[in-house]
Amino acid sequence: MFGLCRRAASTGHVYAGVKSNVSHSRIASSTLTYNKFLSTDASNTEKEVEITKLLQDSLDNATVRVTDISGGCGSMYDIEVVSSSFEGKNRVQQQRMVNEILKKEISEMHGLKLTTKKP
C-alpha cells in the first residue's frame, strides 16, 4: 500500500487518510516527550529519538514530543515543538524552521502532523 508499513493496511483506524491497525493505546504508549535530556526508554523507536535530538540540538529551550503514528514503521509522525526560538515568529515561520531542520527526515516520511508553539 504505497510503501507504507504492512501493518497499516489491515483494519479500519484512519490517521491522516491512511488506514492503520494501530490502537489508540499503542499510539499513546509510543509517545516520546523530552525537555533537554533524552530518555533511554526502550519503547521509543530510534527515529523518534533521532528526530527529538535533532530538534533539541537546533532550537533554544525546546520541549519536543514525537509520536510514531504508523505503528512503529516510521512512515508517519505527530510532532509537537514548544521553543523560545519561535518568539516573534508566526505559525508558518515556526513550521518552516522545523521543516528545514527535519528536511532529510521529512523526505523519508509518508505523513507528518506538526504543531509548533511559543512557551
Image: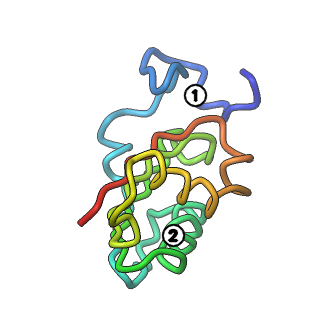
The extreme bottom residue here reads: 37
Residue under the point 40% across and 71% down: 85
Please determine whether, in this image, residue 68 is positioned above or below residue 39. above
Q: Residue 96 location in percent, x, y?
A: 55, 52
| Quarter where residue 6 is shown | top right
Quadrant location, the N terminus: top right
Left or right: 67 in relation to 111 = left
Q: Residue 18 location in percent, x, y?
A: 55, 22
| Front position among marks 1 and 2 | 2
Residue under the point 76% across and 31% down: 3
Quadrant location, the C terminus: bottom left
Callout 2 environment at 10 Å: few (<14), some (14 to 19), or many (20+)?
some
Q: Amino acid at mark 2?
A: Leu
Marker disc for residue 8: 1
Name the element at disc 2.
helix
Residue under the point 59% across and 53% down: 99
Marker disc for residue 38: none
Q: CA distance from mark 1 to mark 2?
A: 27 Å
Name the element at disc 1.
helix
Q: Residue 107 location in percent, x, y?
A: 73, 46
Whichever of callouts 1 and 2 sits on the residue coming sooner in the sequence is 1
Q: Amino acid at mark 1?
A: Ala
What residue sits right under mark 2 in the picture? 55
